[in-house]
Image (tube, rainbow, N blue to C red):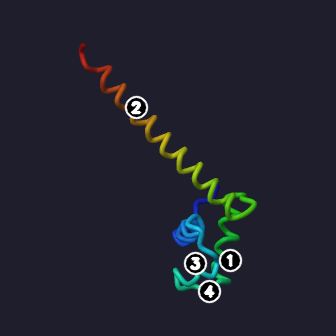
Amino acid sequence: MTALSSREREVLNLIAQGFSNREIGTQLNISEETVKSQVRAILHKFGARNRAHAVALDAVMSLERVLSAVQSAENSLENMLSGIPG
């Protein structure tokens, strides 16, 4: 999956907060057409069917990153503890 640009990330965060395209445009000081273009790019990059699907996919990917970080920390801790004489 292609990473989102910083602007696409901003747009997706506002979508997740329930903003309409017009409201997002106002918030980011860009035209509604530019917002629509950004939304299309987000949907394409995520392979999402609609805005809600894109938000859901982003949430799942965020949780997967957190889980991976936790597992990595656990492994590091286990490695450190295994070297301590007991």
Give the residue drawn at x 55%, y 66%: 17
Q: Are marks 3 and 1 in contact (CB under 8 Å)?
A: no
Q: Is residue 37 left or right of residue 69?
A: right
Q: Amino acid at mark 3?
A: Ile
Frontmost of labels 3 and 1 is 3
Q: Which mark is residue 31?
A: 4
**Mark 4 or mark 1, which is nearer the start of the sequence?**
4
SS of the residue at dot 4?
loop
Q: Tell me the residue that label 3 is attached to.
A: 24
Residue 44 in the image: x percent, y percent?
71, 64
Residue 54 in the image: x percent, y percent?
66, 59
Q: Amino acid at mark 4?
A: Ser
Gap between marks 2 and 3, in whole Å?
40 Å
Q: Tell me the residue that label 2 is attached to.
A: 74
**Mark 2 or mark 4, which is nearer the start of the sequence?**
4
Gap between marks 3 and 1, in whole Å?
10 Å
Frontmost of labels 4 and 2 is 4
Frontmost of labels 2 and 3 is 3
Q: Are marks 3 and 4 in contact (CB under 8 Å)?
A: no
- The one of 77 and 66 positioned closer to us in this rendering: 66
**Mark 1 or mark 3, which is nearer the start of the sequence?**
3
SS of the residue at dot 1?
helix
Q: Is residue 69 left or right of residue 7?
A: left
**Mark 3 or mark 2, which is nearer the start of the sequence?**
3
- Placement of the C terminus among the 4 image quadrants: top left
Q: Tell me the quarter of the picture where residue 3 sits.
A: bottom right
Q: Tell me the residue that label 1 is attached to.
A: 36
Q: Is residue 80 left or right of residue 16?
A: left
Q: Which mark is residue 11?
A: none
Q: Amino acid at mark 2?
A: Glu
